[in-house]
Image (cartoon, helix red, strand yellow):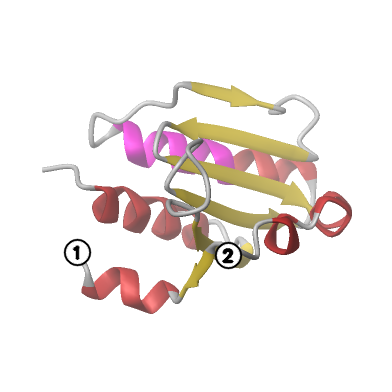
Amino acid sequence: MNTINTKLNTIIDALADKKAVEIQLIDISEVSTIADYFVITNGVNSSQIQALADNVEEKLAMTGTHPRSVEGYNTANWILMDYNDILVHIFDKESRGFYDLERMWRDGKTIDLKSIETRK
């Protein structure tokens, strides 16, 4: 069974495996129709940012989940991975600070990553 919590755990674990920086999870289900969750993180260089995206895609593919689209992979300053109900944003440090999605989507609920594990 591939529930949304299972997908979120897989994404967070895949990002943590590749040493993602400051992983944030925001529940936007009550403030937007584009998705239910944003996962936001950053890497320290373009190689790591691409490795983060590759690992997320690989780990979710193992569960039969594939992205609807992936944008920004070649430039690797902001990779957006669309998994329908989950949007994964992988930034470089400068772009994350510039776009500041956490501030833009502050009406959403920031979720403690530890609580996701208890909702499996």
Q: Name the quarter where the C terminus is drawn.
A: bottom left
Residue 76: x %, y % from top left: 76, 36
Residue 54 vs residue 95: left or right?
Answer: left
Residue 26: x %, y % from top left: 52, 61
Q: Main secondary structure of the magenta part?
A: helix
Q: Which residues are magenta?
A: 52-61
Residue 84 vs residue 70: left or right?
Answer: left
Kind of residue at disc 1:
Lys
Residue 84: x %, y % from top left: 41, 31
**Residue at 67% across, 36% down:** 79
Q: Name the quarter where the N terminus is drawn.
A: top left
Determine the secondary structure under disc 1: loop
**Residue at 30% across, 31% down:** 65
Give whichever of discs 2 and 1 has the lower sequence position. 2
Q: Is residue 72 magenta?
A: no
In the picture of the structure, the residue carrying the numbered disc 1 is 120
Label 2 Cα crowd, 10 Å radius (few <14 / some 14-19 / many 20+) = some
**Residue at 20% across, 47% down:** 3
Q: 24 or 85: nearer the eye?
A: 85
In the picture of the structure, the residue carrying the numbered disc 2 is 23
Q: 40 or 10: nearer the eye?
A: 40
Determine the image quadrant of residue 117. bottom left
How many numbered tags mark residues here?
2
Q: Is residue 56 magenta?
A: yes
Determine the secondary structure under disc 2: strand
Kind of residue at disc 2:
Ile
**Residue lying at the far left of the rendered structure:** 1
Residue 34 vs residue 42: left or right?
Answer: left
Residue 11: x %, y % from top left: 42, 51
